[in-house]
């Protein structure tokens, strides 16, 4: 892998983490609107599922980024 490809891969991995973080924030904000003072305190299944999926994607993105960094540090990329 040449340096340009490595940088592109690193950038894509970091973008994935950033996007996942933004989705968690959006899903959390949507979930919070369902609690007082705005909501009734009974979150919808959709809001809970969206939040859970966003958290899972963030976890997956972070794990992939960690693996990439470890490979770079070990000289495998």
Image: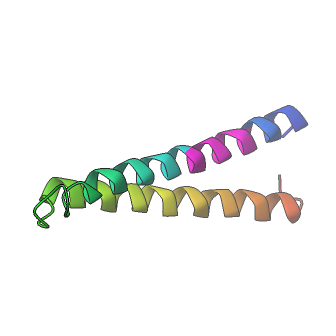
Residue 8: horizontal and vertical position, in percent? 75, 35
Left or right, residue 76 beside residue 66: right
Q: Is residue 9 above or below residue 57?
A: above
Give the magenta range: 9-18
Q: Quadrant of residue 41?
A: bottom left
Q: Is residue 60 magenta?
A: no
Left or right, residue 26 beside residue 77: left
The residue closer to the viewer here, 56 or 70, is 56
Q: Is residue 5 above or below residue 17?
A: above
Residue at image x 43%, y 47%?
23
Residue 20: horizontal and vertical position, in percent? 49, 49
Residue closest to the far top: 4
Q: Is residue 30 above or below residue 6?
A: below
Residue at image x 50%, y 64%?
59
Residue at image x 89%, y 37%?
3
- How did the renderer colour the structure? rainbow
Left or right, residue 26 beside residue 36: right
**Predominant SS of the magenta segment:** helix
The residue closer to the viewer here, 56 or 38, is 38
Q: Is residue 13 magenta?
A: yes
Residue 46: horizontal and vertical position, in percent? 17, 53
Q: Quadrant of the N terminus?
A: top right
The residue closer to the viewer here, 51 or 68, is 51
Left or right, residue 49 beside residue 42: right
Residue 37: horizontal and vertical position, in percent? 20, 60
């Amino acid at each position: 892998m040449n340096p340009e490809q490595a940088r592109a891969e690193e950038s894509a991995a970091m973008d994935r983490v950033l996007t996942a973080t933004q989705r968690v924030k959006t899903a959390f904000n949507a979930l919070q609107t369902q609690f007082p003072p705005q909501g009734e305190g009974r979150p919808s299944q959709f809001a809970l599922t969206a939040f859970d999926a966003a958290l899972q994607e963030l976890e997956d993105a972070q794990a992939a980024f960690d693996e990439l960094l470890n490979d770079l540090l070990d000289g495998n990329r």
